[in-house]
Each structure stands twice: as structure tokens, then as C-alpha cells.
Amino acid sequence: MKYFIDNLIEKIEEKNSRICVGLDPHLNLMPASVLDSALLKNPQENQKEIAEAILYFNKEIIEATAEHTAVVKPQMAFYEKLGTAGMETLWKTINYAWQKGLLVLLDGKRNDIGSTAKAYAEAYLHVDSGADSLTINPYLGRDGITPFLEDKTKGAFALLKTSNPSSADIQDLKLNNGKKVYEAVALFLAKIAEDYLGKTGYSNLAAVVGATYPKELAEIRALIPSIFFLIPGYGAQGGGAKDVKAAFDKQGRGAVINSSRGINFAYRKEEYKDLAPQNFGKAAALAAKKMKNDINSVLDL
């Protein structure tokens, strides 16, 4: 049995790519050739048609970027809001990514206590029909984390220091011992992670740390060397290649850097203006390749 984290690192090194392609289908950014804007005037009545357009879009993005990434990350909110049709599109997207040899990190930030956490794990990390990993909220404690780690072939990415501007409202609060909340959570996660270490030295329990806080990213990496990172906030949110360098070890291991809008909707960027909107897949491939190379260049790989 291969641990999830070892499988992920192996695929990263096969592709020589440390990027994660987010699949966040913002409807207002979709090409007109994919989604008729008239459908958005009454999205509740047009859920099936919109979901079908998203599936087509996702397949094109996956097809175009598969050579440049090891993992894709659908954000569940964009699918859930379309009801049953949206969830069917989500599962079909996951299966298509698997067909292309990619791992799937499902971004749902799920959690609850005890048996309910276990039910979430069974729902989204089922061995045959679920994703390969899931983002979770660790603030319910150990019994809200370990159910997501029972299957060693699956992984969990716990929220730690998130990329949004208001993350400091809670995550940067100082405790009586002088540590910030995110530092205490990091040490808490590292303790649990010890029981789920793969052959690579990293754990199936990983963490989400934003690229928008490079100083904190470096501090957290020094604090928890065996925790693998998912790093959002690259590109559209302001993070760059130099901002994420500290997340990696000397072998170029330790993290995947997510970009969603910057790749999905690259066709809207000035640098790809010569491509027609219907060539959004080609623009996505070029953006993914550029991001991959930018990150590898700061790591001297």
C-alpha cells in the first residue's frame, strides 16, 4: 500500500511540477463559447445546462494542463451551488482527472466531531468514488482530524495560515504562552502527523499555508518540517514564486502551489490576447507551464 503523500510526491517528480491547478469555474469568467450568458439570468432554472458547460470547461482545462501538473483541486462551493447537477459534474470531473493520471485534492474544508467527521471522510474520500485528498478544518481537535486519515491511501490538508487578508483576525491572535494561534495549531498538527509518515518523510496530514504571507510561511516550515503544504494565494491573490521558496526542502519537496483563476481564465490575460477565447485550453496550458517553470527556477531545479 502506497501512502497518499508518497504517491503525490512521486507524481510531482514525474512531472517535475509543483503546481496544483484549481478548478474554480467562476461563471462570469467563462468563455462565451462555453457558457451562454443568457443562462445566468436565471441560474436556478438552468442548473443542468450550466453544470454541463462547467464539465466541458473542466475537461478542456484538465486535458490542456495534465502534462504540467500532478494534481487538480476542485473548489466544492462552485459545484454545490448548482445542486444535484453540480455535484454530478464534480464527480465526473474527478473521474476525468483520474483518467488523465492526476490526483484530486477536493477543496471542501469539511469537518465536524467524531462520527460526523467519519461520515464526511466516507463521503468524500471513499476508496472507489471519492477524491484522493480533502481540505479540512482542524479547529475541532484530534477527533475531527483522525477520521480523515484512516485510509493511508488518502490525505487531508488542514487549514493553518490561510491566504485571505482577514486570516489574522483569529489565526494571529497571541496565546498566554506567547505563541500565535497558527503556531499552536502547527505544532498540534505535527504531533498527529507523526503517526502518518510516508517513506518520503512527509505525512498524509498536510496543511494549507498561504503564499500571501511569505514570512509566516518560512517560519511555519521551520517549525513543522514533516508537514507537506498546499499553498494558495499565488497569482491572482498576489503571491509569487519567490514568496513560496521557503516551503521546499533541498530536494524540491514539501509543497504544491495552487493557481485557479490564473490558469483557468488565462485566456483573459493581456499576454494571451492573440489567442481567441475558444482557445482557453491552450492559454491555460501556457500559463501552467510558465508557473511550473517559474517555481522550478527559484528552486534551482
Image (cartoon, grey):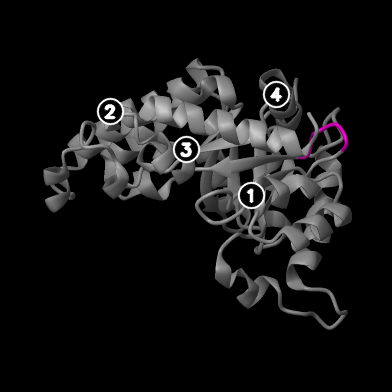
Q: Earlier in the sequence, mark 1 or mark 3?
A: 1
> Where residue 111 appears, x then y in whole percent?
57, 55
Q: Earlier in the sequence, mark 4 or mark 3?
A: 4
Q: Amino acid at mark 1?
A: Gly
Residue designated by label 2: 278
The magenta segment is 250-254
Could one spot residue 69 in this view of the protein? Answer: yes
Q: CA distance from mark 2 to mark 3?
A: 15 Å
Q: Is residue 253 magenta?
A: yes
SS at circle 3: helix
SS at circle 4: loop
Could one spot residue 94 in this view of the protein? Answer: no
**Mark 4 and mark 1 in contact (Cβ < 8 Å)?**
no
Residue designated by label 3: 263
SS at circle 1: loop
Residue at 56% x, 28% y: name it.
Answer: 289
Q: Earlier in the sequence, mark 2 or mark 3?
A: 3
Front one among 273 and 112: 273
Residue designated by label 4: 16
- Please tell me whether residue 226 is drawn above or below residue 126 in the rendered image: below
